Amino acid sequence: MGEPPKEKPVTEPNRRSFHKFGSILLGSIIGAVLTIPGIGFILSPILRKTDAEDGESTGDGFQALAKLSDLQEGIPKVFPVLGKVKDAWVQYPEEPVGSVWLVRKGEAVDAFSAECPHLGCAVSLGPDGNSFFCPCHTSAFTLEGKPNNPVPPRAMDSLEVVLKQTPASDETEIRVKFQRFRTAIPEKSPLA
Amino acid sequence: MLKQLSDWLDNRTGYKHLISETLDEPVKGGARWKYVFGSAVTTAFMMQLITGIFLMTAYSPSSSTAWGSVYFISYEMVGGWFVRGMHHFGAQAMVILLFLHLLQVLIAGAYHAPREVNWWLGMVLLFITLGFSLTGYLLPWDQKGYWATKVATNIMGLTPLFGAQVQKVVVGGSEYGNQTLTRFFGLHVGVLPGLLIMTLAAHIMVFRRHGVTAPKSSTGSEPFWPKQVFMDTVASVAVVGVVAFFAIAERGAPLDAPAEPSSSDYPARPEWYFLSLFQLLKQPAFAGENEIIGAIIVPGAIVAALFAFPLLEKFIPRKLAHLLACGLVFGLTGAAGLLTMQAMTADSGDADFKISRDKADVARRRALFLAGNPKAGVPPEGSRYLLLNDPLHTGQQILEQKCLSCHYFDGKGVMERGKDGKKVMTRQVASDLSGFGSRGWVRGLLDNPSDTKYFGTTPQCGGMKRWKKTSKLKPDELDKVADFVASFAKVGNEETIDDWMTKEDVTKHPGLELFKKDCGRCHTVDAGGALGEGGEEEAPNLFGWGSPRWIQRMIRHPEAADRYGFLEQKGQMPGFDETELAVREMTVLMKLLKGDYIPNPPEPAKAGSH
Ligand code: FES
């Protein structure tokens, strides 16, 4: 191969442009082979189907958080939500994955995710005990979860609640479907 | 517009000059295919750099997480198997290409003055690359990397004077663990790439200074761009193509079971290009005291000789020096080839190697299967516990190590090496444990206690056999008794005998009366004797028989009065306290006996991606 060049090696213009074009083409192929799978790799969190199905609460998604008798009319109380968490490759056993505020109104119960709709801090009780307050950027909410000042983009995220009579005793179980929502937007849009 | 922009940039940076200087570099005697090796190595290195950085975004260097993160890369992330496969085979390509580059430089005599320094820089690059491969091999923290690294660092420890200290620093102590991984990781992704880039830059700079070593007959020159660039690019495509081919054909890089420091028979082997050194150590000449010769002195002498090549011509004629250098390298290559072949044939002809490799493969498939199973998954304690907590894997191991020297399981003991060196199955001197505690086991016992599965191999336990001779129970009655006894296995750990005895399942069980009449003559269950007074012959207490609590007590205290304390001591089973059988081991053993584990899929999980 590579015949020894003549006295003065002159490569004809045709061959020169072939070499130029070829180098660029082949170089781009190498680049593509190396980077395209890598980009897919980096974008895995978007491209893969999520683990949501095997994580978080099981079954219908509702879990019993408390008994109706645990709550007093109009006094909010916070309860942990349990879930099986898969953190990339690690499978954790069932443990608290979030908190929910429950407010009793007669025979009904309101449930709010304790995750602030503003930027995701944990919402706590206001100093008066009669409202919700987020310590991060001072979002304030009424006990109905409505914004009390213009900081939060929307109301606190209410969660679905079912009240269920337990067969054994005559207690009423409060079952809540825990979900996470995107923060910082006016709509309540569930995270996959 | 574009022209204006590029002029502006050129005016500020002078990049056009830089590029033209690079591209118009004259190639003496014209472009040639044989000059492509250096570029091919550089491409291989760039490939490692790119894939390596991708991998770094997903890898986690600690002994509890490394394996899990590599599993996640290979089996769960999009394209992860390919990226890791490219990195794995790219590493091997780099070693091969470096070697070819070395051969080509050697044959062309491109190491002679004035190019000595560049030869040395090339040697340094070779060692940095081998350093990459040694450190990278450990990072998945799988069995293969763990054991190979242990061997390699122990060889390092053989070095005179500082060996032991160097080893301790590299390993991060005397135990292999988190510090070993973080250090190897730091070397692999920080120190070595830095060194390699600097050395490579110097190597290319020096190369530019002297140019290629053109054949004597050639004349004239030709610019680097575009013909030589084209040739280099074609070579690079070939390299990337071959590596991609292997990555796809092998479906990524292999991942062995998580590192298990307690393995007793893992057949450790280094990467194939270290096999010759590995085999060298196995030569009888380097046994014992002489180990250091094979491990350090011979390889060290070879390295010294390679470094000395450019200096030879100072003492002997250039032609002769060249001949000597080429002769030595070809001789060594041939010897290394022979040793490698020897290592391979030794393994393929070795039945023991095959057995332990098969065992390792079973563990590997099990670990990969469990890691991907939603009911299992890598536990937070660490990847190692994936198998340690698995009844099928570890329970079976414990059973083999601690129980099957006397008991059988499914008609088999374990193979043990006898005095004559031949492997024979252990002799059965106790019952067969498969199905112990199940209805089938009890029913079989009631049918024929003298069967080897039950008391056939334990003459000291004659009670059941004597009962059988006199018992008048008919098969349908035996069925009922078996049903009743098998229900004992459901007794919970916290359940008291009083609670249990008042359950309808017990008080109304069709087997209850038969049990009282026949079994209760010897066996007791409750202290009050409501289920039989016992006493006719001595026999173990049957409350909770076959349940974890019964078996645990049997294992911990076989000498207890409510177990087999009535036997003479030499006829008793030896007890296992918590130092001999840890709580964790007891748990998995119990689960194995109860069949409480995730069964393997019918088809063995394939290595590689899905
Ligand atoms: S996160 Fe709650 S106020 Fe900003």
Image: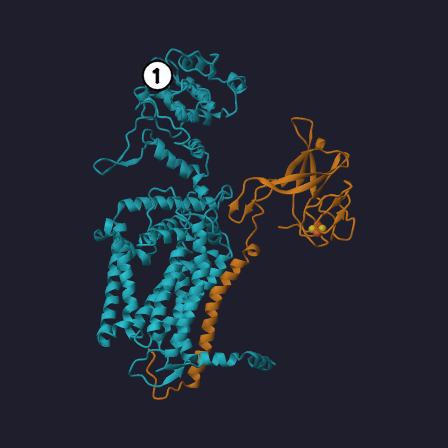
The spot of residue B211 in percent (x, y) is: 37, 78
- Is B541 located above or below residue B289 in the figure? above
Q: Is mark 1 within 8 Å of ligand 1?
A: no
The spot of residue B322 in percent (x, y) is: 25, 73
State the residue position of label 1.
B463
Q: Is residue A187 visible?
A: yes
Which of B212/B491 is in front? B212
| Label 1 Cα neighbours within 10 Å, binned few <14 / some 14-19 / many ≥20 | some
* Quadrant of residue B47 within the rendered picture: bottom left
Q: Colour of chain A?
A: orange
Query: Is B305 situated left or right of B467 in this image?
Result: left
- Is B138 located above or below residue B423 in the figure? below
The spot of residue B228 in percent (x, y) is: 40, 78
Query: Is B575 situated left or right of A96 in this image?
Result: left
Residue lying at 24% horizontally and 67% vertically, measured from the top left: B328
The spot of residue B560 in percent (x, y) is: 40, 20
- Is B194 located above or below residue A84 in the figure? below
Query: Is B7 situated left or right of B75 in this image?
Result: right
The chain that appears cyan in the image is B
Which of B28/B70 is in front? B28
Q: Secondary structure under badge 1?
A: helix
Q: Tally the marks.
A: 1
Residue lying at 64% horizontally and 39% vertically, measured from the top left: A80
Q: Is residue A117 visible?
A: no
- Is A72 located above or below residue B170 in the figure? above
Query: Is B334 situated left or right of B120 in this image?
Result: left
In the rendered image, the quadrant that contains the N terminus of chain A is: bottom left
